[in-house]
Image (cartoon, coloured by chain):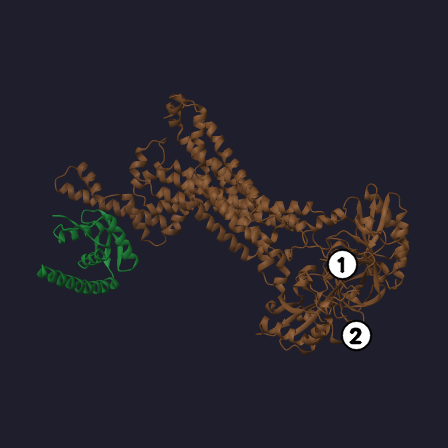
């Protein structure tokens, strides 16, 4: 309202000026018509005077913004095709970038929701490099006892261990993962039960108190608050519920605590961890310690003190171990870090390509408006005004694309959470918060500038006279074309880098999938069982297991049945020194080996090949026999016959085992990791509680496993039976993270390729359209269509080649960052780079050829008539 | 004789100076400056009107609509108290600057 009034005032003020000037001229003797004309001429550019006068009012900026936005919307309505393409690609680019960032934000950047998480560390044992298994290990419980008693840098030292339990009585019997904790674990993290109380110092001696997780409390006890003080049956023994943890408690899972922690399952129940120090063996590294440092104590100081406290043990045990502290947050995210940052980089590159493409489209779009710009400049519009207006057109596009993109990001996040492999840590913590919104806004601002800058600059540099003189079909000036070529080159370069990243990950994945696994996955199905109930005394388990295997072997279609303490691909476990009692090798030079406790038919069921000697016999369930992996045999007895040699069992104590056979290597953990040396001994020597049954079937494993489960339920109705898994499913799960990363990277690379192709095609189509009269003349003069196509291709490919070279250089430079993600693929594999270059080139050629062919089909008469 | 275009600060001062003799409209101010300088100083409307609106915003002048002697409705500007003070300060600065420039030019002249 006020604006309009002031505008009217200004109009009247200037009308009065002109009227008075004219009157003076009439008084001086000019004719009224001349006077009016001269007054106007003397006044100058009326519109421009008004414009810059209005600027003095101070709030024109807002007004102008509003005007420009309305103008931009009008422009967009005039070319809905362009608008749709620009908004959609921007939405996809911004949406993908925002979704990816919110994941990085949730997984990597947001601090753990514990009290002052910067002071929380995980203590790990680091072995000398000869150990060759993993970088770091759990700790010994004696370490913990020592630290808790004496560590002065620590505010609180806690200890945890994963365990499984069977819950009976609340619905079907179910196997649960439990976290055994020292009484102060939750206190160390700074979290408190939402119901009931935490453990007390005296409760470490196994008095049967447990704390429930929120999800167990809801799923099994209908969130009943009166659960406190009630007894529940765990492993056949009553336990009293003393507390329930809050829903917001998110704990790291499995390997996120460090290697060899246990399966990546959510612990549903917490029980006190009590241990009898006298039973602990020196090289039993089974526990994880979470330590809260005192304020102001550095990580270096603390680890020095922890190591000093252990000096005596280390001397006694002849183990050259060291303790290292890892920040809890880093520990939780270390596996996902490279992968996520890589994907974020890729999505950023895609966004950049999107912006370049939209910028290019806008350039094409504005090319038809130079005349308009010229007219406006001639009428007094300022160049900054034109520049700002063009930027605002970009802003409107980005705002629309961004809004749509945010919705896409929201949906994408849900999709990502559903598709992501389970071991992506803290994924449930990814959501759209203000960090993410800030990131989205920043990328939108960035997009606005990258899209709008070049067109805005171009338009505002228009020379009014030239633009008015030039006919619509005239060729553009050189520098405007050059701009576009640079943009195309940039797109090609970025796409090449993304293609090579995607290609490397794809090749790695193929290599991993084609690696000789060392066992068979087809028609092999597994069923986990656990002898948790107290009725299975240590000695009784082997007998029951043997009975089960005999029954299962009778099921029609079952070729072989075996059992093992741990399946391949599911992680390292039961690790100890590999000791040959007949050799004088010092203990510290002994390699670590994974021990497996198996039944005689295990290898046949799993399809692990026998290399030398024989398998266990049916009468050897409790004989002192061992089978070693090829690697173990090579290490202990290089060039000699391993059969008839001896190894010491788990922990180095007890009698020696006769080596009766050598079998092939199998991966303990992920397929792409080194295969540890492995020693197999009969089940009875350790009689582990958790056992995986392995069934090889003749045909469809489905019916066999159904029959098997029914039979197992008949043998022990109280035994919890988690879902059976085929080895194919286990294999699938073990490569899920790699596959997921590869798929995303390849998707981003293909998106980049497509966008670059569209960009090239758009630019060349436009160039051909502008040159149509010229092409018409050439054809009229006798040019063959091949010549025309060649001409267009030459022009189109000109920016592609330098872009490709830059992209190859970029790919070479960035490949080093990828090394950790690759498997048996050289980061600079020349064949891959050639392949990527070929894909890029052929895409560019097709993108140029389509408009070139249209150009060659120009009807010379029509083209010239249009002029 | 060539006409000289005025720079912003000087124009502001001349506008305030012109208004010292009474309220005036934009056209009148331009005429007064031109006449007062014997046609040497030229005021472009593209400078005059922005300057007037700027000074009004700075509250050195105020405006009201009045009838001219020729019954033409026009926007008349007049000095405010702040404007008078500003003018005095500007005048002081101007005389210092012009004296300094004059001295400088004289020195150059005698050297040459």
Report which quarter residue A661 is drawn in.
Answer: bottom right
Confirm whether residue A764 shows in the render.
yes
Colour representing chain A: brown
Tally of numbered discs: 2
Q: Nearest the camera: A689 or A501? A: A501
- Residue at which label 1 appears: A637
Rendered shade, chain B: green
Please tell me whether residue A461 is drawn above or below residue A179 in the rendered image: above
Examine the rendering and report whether any part of residue A250 can be seen: no
Which corner quadrant holds the C terminus of chain A?
Answer: top left
Q: Mark 2, residues whose alpha carbon is within 10 Å: few (<14), some, or many (≥20)?
A: few
User: Mark 2 vs mark 1: which is more N-terminal?
Assistant: 2
Tag nearer the camera, 2 or 1: 1
Tell me which residue sits at (65%, 63%) in the image.
A129
Q: Residues within 10 Å of mark 1 (few under 14, many from 20)?
A: some
**Mark carried by residue A278:** 2
In x, y percent, where is residue A488? 45, 41
Chain bearing mark 1: A
Relative to residue A592, is residue B30 drawn left or right?
left
């Amino acid at each position: 309202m006020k604006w309009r009034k002031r505008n009217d005032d200004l109009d009247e003020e200037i009308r009065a000026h002109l009227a008075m000037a004219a009157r003076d001229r009439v008084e001086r003797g000019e004719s009224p018509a001349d006077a009016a004309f001269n007054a106007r001429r003397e006044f100058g550019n009326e519109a421009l005077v008004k414009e810059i006068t209005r600027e003095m009012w101070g709030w024109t900026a807002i007004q102008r913004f509003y005007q420009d936005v309305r103008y931009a919307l009008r422009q967009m309505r005039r070319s809905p095709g362009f608008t749709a393409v620009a908004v959609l690609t921007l939405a996809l680019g911004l949406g993908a970038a925002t979704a990816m960032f919110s994941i990085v934000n949730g997984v990597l950047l947001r601090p753990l929701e514990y009290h002052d998480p910067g002071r929380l560390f995980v203590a790990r044992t680091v072995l000398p490099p000869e150990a060759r298994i993993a970088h770091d290990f759990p700790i010994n419980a004696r370490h913990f006892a020592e630290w808790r008693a004496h560590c002065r840098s620590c505010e609180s030292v806690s200890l945890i261990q994963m365990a499984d339990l069977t819950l009976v009585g609340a619905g079907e019997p179910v196997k649960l993962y439990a976290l055994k904790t020292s009484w102060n674990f939750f206190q160390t993290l700074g979290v408190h039960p939402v119901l009931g109380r935490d453990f007390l110092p005296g409760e470490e001696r196994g008095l049967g108190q447990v704390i429930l997780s929120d999800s167990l409390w809801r799923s099994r006890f209908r969130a009943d608050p009166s659960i406190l003080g009630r007894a529940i049956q765990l492993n056949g023994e009553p336990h009293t519920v003393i507390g329930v943890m809050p829903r917001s408690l998110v704990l790291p899972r499995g390997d996120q605590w460090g290697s060899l922690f246990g399966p990546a399952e959510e612990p549903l129940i917490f029980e006190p961890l009590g241990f009898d120090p006298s039973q602990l063996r020196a090289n039993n590294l089974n526990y994880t310690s979470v330590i809260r440092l005192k304020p102001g104590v550095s990580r270096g100081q603390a680890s020095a003190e922890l190591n000093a406290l252990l000096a005596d043990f280390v001397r006694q045990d002849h183990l050259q171990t060291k303790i290292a502290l890892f920040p809890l947050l880093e520990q939780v995210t270390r596996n996902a870090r490279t992968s996520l940052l890589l994907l974020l980089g890729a999505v950023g590159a895609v966004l950049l390509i999107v912006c370049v493409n939209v910028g290019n489209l806008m350039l094409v779009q504005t090319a038809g408006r130079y005349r308009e710009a010229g007219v406006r400049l001639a009428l007094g519009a300022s160049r900054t005004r034109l520049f700002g207006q063009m930027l605002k057109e970009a802003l409107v596009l980005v705002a629309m694309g961004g809004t749509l993109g945010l919705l896409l990001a929201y949906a994408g996040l849900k999709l990502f959470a559903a598709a992501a492999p389970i071991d992506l840590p803290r994924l449930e913590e990814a959501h759209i918060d203000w960090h993410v919104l800030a990131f989205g806004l920043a990328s939108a601002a960035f997009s606005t500038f990258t899209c709008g800058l070049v067109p805005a600059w171009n338009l505002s540099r228009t020379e009014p006279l030239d633009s008015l003189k030039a006919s619509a079909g005239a060729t553009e000036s050189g520098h405007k074309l050059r701009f576009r070529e640079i943009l195309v080159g940039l797109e090609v370069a970025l796409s090449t880098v993304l293609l090579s990243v995607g290609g490397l990950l794809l090749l790695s994945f193929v290599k991993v999938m084609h690696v000789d696994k060392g066992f068979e996955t087809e028609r092999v199905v597994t069923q986990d069982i656990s002898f948790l109930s107290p009725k299975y005394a240590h000695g009784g388990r082997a007998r029951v297991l043997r009975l089960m295997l005999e029954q299962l072997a009778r099921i029609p279609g079952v070729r072989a049945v075996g059992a093992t303490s741990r399946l391949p691909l599911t992680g390292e476990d039961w690790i100890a020194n590999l000791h040959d009692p007949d050799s004088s090798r010092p203990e510290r030079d002994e390699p670590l080996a994974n021990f497996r406790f198996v039944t005689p038919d295990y290898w046949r069921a799993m399809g692990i090949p026998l290399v030398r000697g024989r398998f266990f016999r049916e009468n050897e369930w409790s004989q002192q026999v061992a089978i070693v992996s090829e690697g173990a045999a090579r290490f202990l007895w290089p060039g000699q016959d391993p059969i008839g040699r001896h190894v010491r069992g788990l922990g180095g104590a007890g009698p020696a085992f006769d080596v009766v056979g050598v079998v092939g290597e199998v991966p303990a953990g992920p397929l792409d990791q080194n295969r540890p040396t492995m020693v197999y001994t009969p089940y009875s020597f350790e009689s582990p509680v958790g056992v995986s049954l392995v069934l090889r079937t003749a045909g469809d494993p489905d019916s066999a496993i159904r029959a098997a489960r029914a039979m197992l339920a008949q043998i022990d109705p109280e035994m919890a039976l988690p879902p059976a898994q085929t080895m194919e499913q286990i294999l699938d799960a073990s490569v899920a993270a790699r596959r997921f990363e590869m798929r995303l990277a390849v998707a981003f690379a293909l998106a980049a390729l497509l966008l670059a192709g569209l960009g090239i095609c758009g630019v060349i189509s436009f160039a051909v359209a502008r040159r149509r009269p010229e092409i018409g003349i050439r054809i009229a003069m006798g040019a063959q269509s091949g010549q025309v196509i060649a001409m267009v291709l030459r022009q189109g490919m000109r920016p592609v080649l330098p872009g490709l070279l830059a992209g190859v250089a970029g790919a070479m430079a960035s490949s080093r960052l990828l090394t950790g993600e690759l498997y048996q693929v050289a980061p600079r594999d020349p064949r891959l780079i050639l392949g990527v270059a070929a894909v890029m080139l052929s895409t560019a050629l097709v993108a140029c050829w389509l408009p070139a062919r249209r150009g060659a089909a120009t009807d010379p008469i029509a083209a010239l008539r249009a002029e | 004789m060539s006409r000289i275009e005025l720079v912003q600060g000087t124009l502001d001062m001349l506008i305030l100076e012109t208004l010292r003799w009474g309220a005036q409209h934009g056209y009148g101010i331009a005429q007064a400056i031109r006449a007062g300088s014997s046609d040497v100083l030229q005021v472009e409307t593209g400078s005059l009107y922005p300057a007037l609106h700027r000074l009004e915003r700075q509250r050195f002048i105020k405006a009201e609509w009045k009838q001219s002697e020729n019954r033409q409705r026009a926007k008349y500007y007049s000095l405010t108290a702040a404007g008078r003070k500003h003018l005095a300060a500007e005048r002081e600065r101007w005389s210092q600057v012009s004296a300094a420039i004059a001295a400088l030019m004289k020195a150059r002249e005698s050297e040459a």
